[in-house]
């Protein structure tokens, strides 16, 4: 049996949707359940339901053999895991955004104060441009920071763009695109080689089926 760490929320729904047609189905109550461990109907996969931020930690330290996680978090946390597959869903972008009335001033400053959940990516990005950055680390509702004058701008994920618009922020730079990735614990590749290969094959066929 493969232990698969999944993030609660949007990526969970998409993952369940692609696994079902290749024979890895879960009860319809899984997504609403308070139970944190679930088995697939065919008993080939055990799912752990986690906060997105914890998925790669469980996979890196062997609490799970595999996981589904956004590329954004892999770029931020750089866990030591094997990443064989782009799952082709969960499309979003990591962007720099500023208040509408800043009118492009943010990227012209030599020193900026940025609120974000992604301190490492933010530091690397602004340093690569030769700009000095002070990072205010937040865990959610990042868009509030410039509204209350706590930061000049933000680095955050954008999917539909609705959250930026609703808070009168505009995107000024794209740092990277992100999609959901399938990751594996490095030792599970050896100790569970057959199960892991079979699982990767099934997921790959699920992704191909979805695209065709
Ligand atoms: C993410 C991100 C933005 C929002 C973008 O937040 O941090 O706030 O989604 O999506 P949109 O472009 O479709 O509006 P999430 O929903 O994960 O909540 P959080 O801010 O509590 O992390």
Image (tube, rainbow, N blue to C red):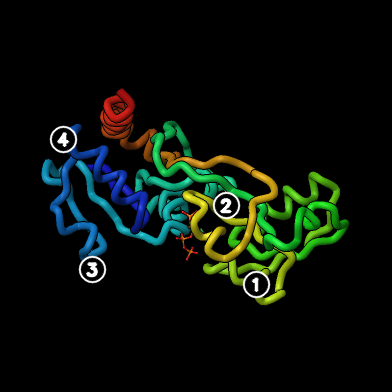
Q: CA distance from mark 1 to mark 4?
A: 48 Å
Give the residue at mark 1.
147
Q: Is the N terminus in the top left, top right, bottom left or bottom right quadrant?
A: top left
| Location of residue 154 (image quadrant) | bottom right
Give the answer, above or below, for where 135 lies relative to 159. below
Q: Is residue 75 visible?
A: yes
The residue under the point 72% across, 69% down is 151
Task: Report the disc number at residue 57.
Answer: none
Residue 194 point in image, percent of width and height: 28, 29
Is there a contact, CB below 8 Å, between mark 1 and mark 4?
Answer: no
Give the residue at mark 3.
34
Q: Please indicate whether residue 97 sits to the left or right of residue 79 in the image.
A: right
In front: label 1 or label 4: 1
Mark sitting earlier along the chain (1/2): 2
Q: CA distance from mark 3 to mark 4?
A: 24 Å
Q: Is the C terminus in the top left, top right, bottom left or bottom right quadrant?
A: top left
Give the residue at mark 4.
23
In front: label 3 or label 2: 3
Is there a contact, CB below 8 Å, between mark 3 and mark 2?
Answer: no
The residue under the point 59% across, 48% down is 94
Residue 131 point in image, percent of width and height: 84, 53
Label 2 secondary element:
helix
């Amino acid at each position: 049996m493969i232990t698969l760490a999944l993030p609660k929320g949007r990526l969970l729904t998409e993952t369940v949707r692609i696994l079902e047609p290749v024979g890895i189905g879960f009860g319809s109550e899984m997504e609403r359940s308070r139970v944190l461990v679930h088995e697939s109907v065919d008993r080939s996969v055990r799912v752990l339901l986690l906060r997105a931020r914890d998925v790669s930690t469980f996979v890196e330290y062997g609490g799970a053999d595999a996981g589904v996680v956004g590329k954004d978090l892999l770029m931020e946390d750089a866990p030591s895991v094997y990443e064989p597959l782009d799952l082709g869903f969960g499309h979003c972008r990591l962007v720099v955004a500023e208040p509408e009335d800043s009118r492009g001033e943010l990227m012209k400053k030599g020193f900026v104060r940025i609120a974000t959940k992604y301190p490492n990516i933010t530091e690397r990005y602004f340093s690569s441009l030769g700009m000095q950055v002070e990072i205010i680390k937040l865990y959610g509702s990042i868009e509030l920071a410039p509204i209350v004058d706590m930061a000049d701008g933000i680095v955050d994920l954008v999917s539909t763009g609705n959250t930026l618009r609703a808070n009168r922020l505009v995107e000024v730079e794209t740092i990277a695109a992100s999609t959901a990735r399938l990751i594996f614990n490095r030792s599970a590749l050896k100790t569970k080689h057959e199960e892991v290969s079979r699982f990767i094959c099934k997921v790959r066929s699920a992704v191909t089926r979805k695209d065709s």
